[in-house]
Image: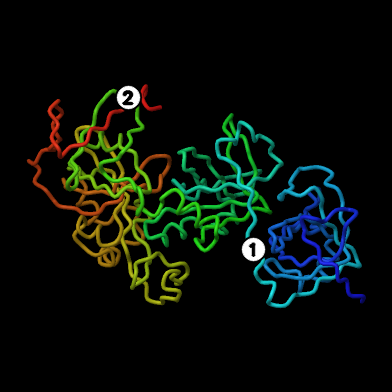
Amino acid sequence: MPVMTTVLPISRLTNRMQGVINARVLKMWEAVDMRNGNVWAMNFVLLDKEGGAIQGIMPINYYRRMQRDFVEGNVSEIGRFSVEHVKKNGYLTVDHAFTLSFSGQTYVTPVSSNLRDIPTCYFVFKSLEDIGTKITEETQPIDVIGFVSDFTQIEDKMVRGTRARMQVVSIRNERGHTVQLTLWSDFIDVLDIIGVHEKSNGEPVILACSSVLVKQYMGTFGLKAYAASRFYTDHKIREVKDFFERFNCNDTVNAKTPTEIDIIDCSPRVVRIKKEGPSIISLADLALLPLDNFSSSQYTCIVDIVGVNNPFDWYYEGCPKCNTKLKETFCSPCKGRKPDPSICYRLLLEVSDDTGTAEFNAVGRTSEGIVGQAASVVKGGMNMDSNELPDPLIKMIGKKFKITVSGKLQVLYKNHRTYKILHTELVSVKEKLSLLPIHDDFGDNTVIIEDDCNEGR
């Protein structure tokens, strides 16, 4: 085989200028014949050290011949390919005027380690505000980045007579604009946002999405994943790290404090919150406060427990060392298998006071202060054939507690807020809810949160 010595950057590839390229296989995905479900070709994206990217395609029989060397993530020398003008922009994942095609003459050779400096990601980020306004084409993949403001539980759906899993992840940018990303089936496992959130240790989860599609449903624009989509949350990736630092998501520079809460509700009222210590407020006022990933605030409510919202999954099998939920006995943070898991509480409690209701989330030992027994003891004494709550959980219903919750954003379950419990204290039934006074003489220990929607908007 003659050696081709002209190594070109991908950005210079045209149908008149060709040669050898040294590139990373950034990603690959199958081209499927929708009439019969057969895979007829492989799509791919190549990326070189200058950051140039080009999309390509090869027949499936050519791919099978070179699949040992042509692997997603690998860096190779590639020659004897053809380059063509982009015929249509539909499903084009990179910014290049040409596409690349493999033939029977194309060769792929792994390169030496001195070319391992080729990037591992490629993004051309679009603004979330442009989705549904400037960006409406549903066949044009885009890249977006933001932090995960909430995500739903995984739900089972029937799609064309087939059962499928669905999950919605909300992505918010630095200007507060939010777009929902819908994931189906395998993409839920690929992203594993629940696992990522559990390992985040309370830090904001930054999500960079490569090649997601715009979709419109009942007049609302959102995003969906397809075969070319890839997701990145690792702070070792420059774009993820830059977003995290640029918008002060590390809670160290200009992070929001309890005295800097911006009210976003437009109801005609003023909420006053003490600067020092957890504030005792009603559930109605708690619902007015904007939860976010920056907040270090704590709020205390005196509430009655009126129910358990997850009666069939109130416990989980956790790591004996860190209490993280195990996946088939494997603990991700500890990076090992735990054959003897601990039984841990995960209670979604419905609570109420004179002003409203809310859902509080109690996990691990925090729950033991409410129930009065360890989860392993409660599970060991329950009738596994019964659909009723165990007696210790039933007995806590109707009791009054002083509960301190976090002002940090928690996951939304079924489109409503849930608040993480930090501390609990059983109180007397006679103890009344102590609300902060509303008056015109404000001391230095209060902060006024005005929700006048006509100013500063």
Q: Nearer the viewer, residue 122 or 399?
A: 122
| Residue 120 location (% of width, % of height) | 63, 63
Point out residue 387 in the picture as x, y percentages from the top left corner.
35, 53
* Most foreground residue, 423 or 117: 117
Which quadrant is home to the N terminus?
Answer: bottom right
Amino acid at circle 2: Asp
Residue 452: assigned label: 2
Residue at 64% in and 53% down: 229
User: What residue do we see at 28% from left, 63% from top?
Assistant: 375
Placement of 378 over or under 229, stated as above or below? below
Mark 2 or mark 1, whichever is nearer to me: 1
Per the model, the C-alpha gap separating discs 2 and 1 is: 48 Å
75 to 90, vertically: above or below: below
Which mark, by number, is residue 201? none
Image coordinates for residue 242, horizontal then vertical, percent: 50, 54
So how many labels did they put on this image? Answer: 2
Q: Are marks 2 and 1 in contact (CB under 8 Å)?
A: no
Relative placement, left or right, of 19 versus 211 is right
Residue sitting at 60 percent across and 34 percent down?
A: 217
Q: In x, y percent, where is residue 99? A: 81, 52
Label 2: element kind: loop
According to the image, label 1 marks what residue? 119
Which is more N-terminal, label 1 or label 2? 1
Quadrant into which the C terminus falls = top left
